[in-house]
Amino acid sequence: MNCGLQRVIDRFPQLAASIQDRFQDDEGFREMCRDYADALDALRRWQASSGPQKAARVEEYRELARALEVEIATTLRLPPPDTEERLR
């Protein structure tokens, strides 16, 4: 399973079926999932760091991950892009 997809399912397990469907059909959503996985990876790297910018970077990536979670949850509440076109 794709790392980004798995990370989003881990965060929103109750929406696993919707996440998988959207991931399969929506390139923009796949990109969001990749961005989310990248943000979590960077967050973990900075949490393990001992560098002088650790605190600032941890907060930056924590905020980015939260923002992506909101964007992902919002996207899942909307109809898929091709559904909107069919309804017109």
Image: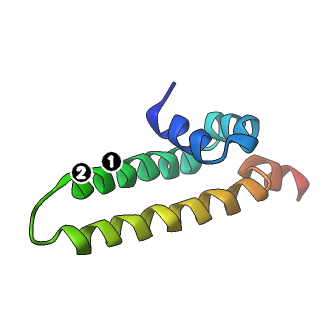
Question: Which residue corresponds to the image point at 66% horizontal and 47% vertical from the top-left?
Answer: 12
Rendering coords of residue 22 (x, y %): 68, 41
Pick whichever, 77 or 56, lies toward us. Answer: 56
Pick whichever, 79 or 56, lies toward us. Answer: 56
When asked about the image quadrant of residue 49, the answer is bottom left
The circle drawn on residue 41 is 1
Q: Residue furthest left?
A: 51
Q: Amino acid at mark 1?
A: Asp
Q: Is residue 7 above or below residue 73?
A: above
In this rendering, position of residue 45 left or right of residue 23: left
Circles 1 and 2 in contact, beta carbons < 8 Å: yes
Q: Residue furthest bottom?
A: 56
Q: Amino acid at mark 2?
A: Arg
Identify the element where label 1 is drawn.
Answer: helix
The residue carrying mark 2 is 45
When asked about the image quadrant of residue 21, the answer is top right
Instruction: Measure the alpha-carbon separation of dots 1 and 2.
Output: 6 Å
Q: Quarter of the image containing the C terminus? A: bottom right
